[in-house]
């Protein structure tokens, strides 16, 4: 897992074995969390065409859909790979920690 790009306090774009992932930062009052999604084909194509602007919009949409809030009907809720047992390894946290050390 490696970091390709990031927007401070908003998102990290990661890649592993050709698959793109977006780790979006969400904050609702006192409750901060991240939502990791695997970009689907349409999202990856939009990113390649539009670039960072697309990721800004996608992270915004994820944040304001409040996927971790109880009762949320967010379309990203069930795509969240950070939900316990969805992704067992710590590769995202490790990649971000390593990136922060070197940047």
Image (cartoon, rainbow, N blue to C red):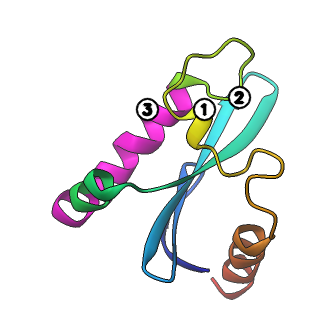
Which labelled disc corresponds to residue 15?
A: none
The quarter in which the C terminus is drawn is bottom right
What residue is rendered at 37% in x and 52% in y? Answer: 55
16 sits left or right of 72 in the view:
left
For label 3, the residue is 61
- Where is 35 relative to 20, above or below? above
- Evaluate whether residue 7 shows in this view: no
Segment colored magenta? 47-64
Residue 77: image tag = 1
The quadrant in which the N terminus is found is: bottom right
Q: Main secondary structure of the magenta part?
A: helix
Eye-nearest disc, 2 or 1: 1
Instruction: Please tell me which residue lies in front, 40 or 13.
Output: 40
* Residue 78: x %, y % from top left: 60, 35
Which badge, 2 or 1, comes first in the chain's sequence? 2
Q: Disc 2 marks which residue?
A: 68
Q: Residue at x 51, y 62 (%)?
A: 21
Residue 78 versus residue 103 in the image, above or below: above
- Tag 2 near tag 1, CB within 8 Å: yes
């Amino acid at each position: 897992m490696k970091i390709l790009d990031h927007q401070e306090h908003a998102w990290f774009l990661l890649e592993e074995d050709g698959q793109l992932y977006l780790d979006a930062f969400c904050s609702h009052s006192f409750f901060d969390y991240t939502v990791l999604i695997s970009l689907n084909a349409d999202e990856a194509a939009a990113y390649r065409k539009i670039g960072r602007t697309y990721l800004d919009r996608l992270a915004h949409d994820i944040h304001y859909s409040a996927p971790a809030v109880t009762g949320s009907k967010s379309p990203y809720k069930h795509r969240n790979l950070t939900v316990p047992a969805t992704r067992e390894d710590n590769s995202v946290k490790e990649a971000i920690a390593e990136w922060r050390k070197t940047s």
